[in-house]
Image (spheres, rainbow, N blue to C red):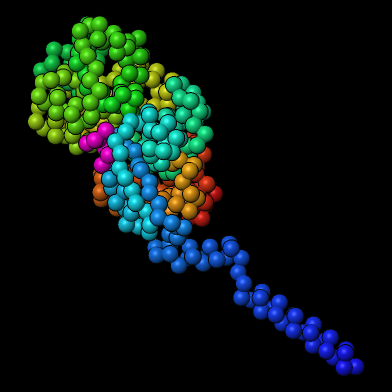
Amino acid sequence: MKKLLALLLCVCMVLSLAACGSKNESTPAATEKAQQETTAGGYRKLAKDEYLSLITGSSGGGWYIMGALFNDKFESNIPGLKMTLLPGGGASNPTVVNGGTDAQIGFTYITNAVAAKAGSGDYEKSDNMYALCNLSVKQFLHLCVPADYKYQTLDDIINNKEGIKMAVGPRAGGNEVAFSRVLEQYGVSYADIESWGGSIQYISAQEGCDAVKDGQVNGNANLAAIPLGVITEMSSAKKITFLKIPDDKAKAACEKYGYTQESIPAGTYTNTEDIPTIADTVVLIISGQVSNDLAYNLAKCLAENKQAWGEGYAALGAFDPANAANCGIPLHPGAEEYYKEAGILK
């Protein structure tokens, strides 16, 4: 009888210890969730300090301004994150981000992101590049010449084989690529312009507008959200003409490359009428090397600060969090998790 009682007592003690263990122990997922819930602002706690570089467009351009705004907000909202801003080019940024060494986040257009992910056109397949956020910002191709230039239409410049000196932004940037694709619809290349006595200047948006004002170049191409500050400044200092892209040429470029036909509204600058052109939509892309927790935090910061974006840069007033996940390419898993949790992505 004593042995039986001792055995029962041992069994009870084992069960009691097991019960205590089940109450006090937590799974790794539960612990992680508790940390995420207690992080200031609802951001996930990072395992260590993180350093990211955001690659934009040329210095002085719209992307550079937006990038500086994002960097400040990312650092102030996400504990342990340090950001660096780098100038870049819209067409080449997907390749840089895919590599993940020089930059881990970048601006580009949906047309470029789709082509890079698929490995079509001039791109090698970018398997390590994902979408972070659709910024809902349309960028319009601005083609400007001085008002006293001898030709005031794009057709006249091409048909008369004018040796125009054109500033187009950095090589492989959104400005340069969009302009070359419009010329392509005329059957004209940069080499043709150079053979006519002209030149293509691969300089920044700021430098290009300054060169027009100073008479060093005859024209300027910028693919940018409206209004672009450097163009506002240029058009205020010097009378300019905005070249209209003919409907047939714009339609052909859109059908081939995925642009949309748009118009720069009258009064945006000194223009008194709408300017027919082409446009693309801006997205942020991100390297697959970025952790899920950090990508989650970045998506959260972007989606939950709509007012700050619009106040910081006029073009970002168009940002729509409900459209943030519509990027044309797969989302980074961390960003996808946030968009699902927030009800943005079903």
Residue drawn 53% across and 62% down?
Answer: 32
Q: Nearer the viewer, residue 300 or 235?
A: 300
Question: In which image quadrant can residue 242 be found?
Answer: top left
Q: Residue furthest right?
A: 1
Residue drawn 88% across and 90% down?
Answer: 3
Q: Residue furthest bottom?
A: 2
**Residue 327 higher or lower than 148, as above or below:** below
Question: Residue 129 appears at what percent x and percent y?
Answer: 47, 37
**Can the viewer see residue 272 in this picture?**
no
Q: Which residues are drawn in magenta?
A: 58-65
**Can the viewer see residue 149 in this picture?**
yes
Residue drawn 30% across and 39% down?
Answer: 86
Question: Residue 42 appears at what percent x and percent y?
Answer: 43, 62
Residue drawn 28% across and 8% down?
Answer: 192
**Residue 228 higher or lower than 169, as above or below:** below
Question: In which image quadrant can residue 268 be found?
Answer: top left
Q: Is residue 76 left or right of residue 120?
A: left
Q: Residue furthest front?
A: 3
Question: Residue 18 appears at what percent x and percent y?
Answer: 71, 77
Q: Nearer the viewer, residue 217 or 145?
A: 217
Q: Is residue 176 left or right of residue 228?
A: right
**Residue 179 higher or lower than 158, as above or below:** below
Question: Residue 292 appears at what percent x and percent y?
Answer: 50, 50
Q: Is residue 231 left or right of residue 280?
A: left
Question: In which image quadrant can residue 65 be found?
Answer: top left
Instruction: Decide whether residue 292 is among the magenta residues.
Output: no
**Residue 248 higher or lower than 96, as above or below:** above
Instruction: Decide whether residue 62 is among the magenta residues.
Output: yes
Position of the N terminus, as image quadrant, is bottom right
